[in-house]
Image: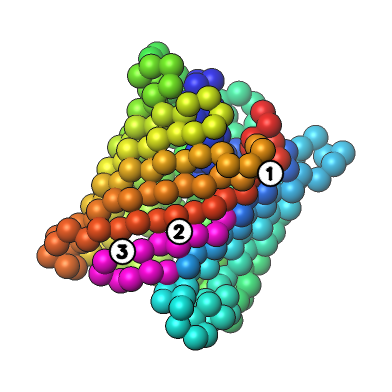
Amino acid sequence: MSTVERVDRFFGDERLLEDNKATVIRAGLGVDWNEADGASLKTRMSARLSLPHLEERLQLIADNITDAEDPAESGRVEDSLRDSRPDAGLRYVVKDEGPIRFSGDAGLRLGSESQVFGKLRARLIVPHDPWEMRLTQVAQWFSRDGLGTTSEMRWSRVLSRDWVFQTHTRLTWREDRDGVAPGQSFSWHRAVGNSSGHRIAVDAEWPEFPHTTEDVYVMSYGYRRLIHRDWLFVELVPGVDFNQARDYEPNPRFALMFEVMLGELRKR
């Protein structure tokens, strides 16, 4: 479990933002390109600010992601920022003891059509030597978008001192969309000390299953490197996707992301 934790922390796994107790801040800026759609400029920011004197149970939370297509075209970046929908709120950790964690969020999604939201999240870690199983269940409600749930199961196994294999199964349902959205990924991670890492991944998504018309399959390789002190990273991810909407024609893609990670996410 300690090796899986080390690899997850180096690659900045998203679940660490949901499981942390102390203050964590992440911010990223990068470019995403694929042959079919061209280039887009991406930004993302997440913050979990632990309030003092509350036994690390109450946190201020904030998240925002923007995606500006054709960033060289005049006004596209400004339009993307204007259309973004940042979340801000409070998180209360009801229980965080060993393998069990239960928390609740409440806040406001800002934007042109602001809405309030609430979220409950439960996580359970079950070791099955030599595997680790992680179960996560999320239920959320937005005043405009309605209810939604996400169920996740992740299996992890250490293959050697540096390599970790993971399989991640996800099922999402949203009241404002038809069907369900299954997802499946297989990935191999290698973190060499605290300076560089490699990731090989195969991902698949089936939106609005069982009547999906835009299922997509992605194969990618990622190289991540610490480039300044212990908080600035760069990640390069070449790959190829096969989308049902394009008759599964190979679509080359490439992503470059600079990311800042501050707080206990890196220091534990």
- The image shows residue 55 at horizontal and vertical percentages of 80, 35
- Mark 3: which amino acid? Asn
Q: Is residue 150 magenta?
A: no
Q: Residue at x 17, y 58 (%)?
A: 250
Residue identified by numbered label 1? 262
Q: Residues within 10 Å of mark 3 (few under 14, many from 20)?
A: some
**Residue at the outermost right position:** 53
Image quadrant for the C terminus?
Answer: top right
Q: Residue at x 39, y 24 (%)?
A: 163
Q: Nearer the viewer, mark 1 or mark 3?
A: 3
- The image shows residue 126 at horizontal and vertical percentages of 46, 23
- Mark 2: which amino acid? Gly
Q: Residue at x 49, y 64 (%)?
A: 42
**Residue 210 visible, this orientation:** no
* Nearer to us in this view, 104 or 221: 221
Q: Residues within 10 Å of mark 2 (few under 14, many from 20)?
A: some
Label drawn at residue 34: 3
Residue identified by numbered label 2? 148
Q: Is residue 16 rendered to the left or right of residue 207? A: right
Find residue 158 and report its image quarter.
top left
User: How far apart are labels 1 and 3 at the CA level?
Assistant: 30 Å
* Nearer to us in this view, 51 or 72: 72
| Up/down of 95 relative to 113, above or below | above
Q: For the magenta stretch, what is the residue range?
A: 28-40
**Residue at the outermost front position:** 227
Q: Is residue 22 rendered to the left or right of residue 181? A: right
At numbered mark 1, what does the secondary structure look like: helix, strand or loop? strand
Q: Residues within 10 Å of mark 1 (few under 14, many from 20)?
A: some
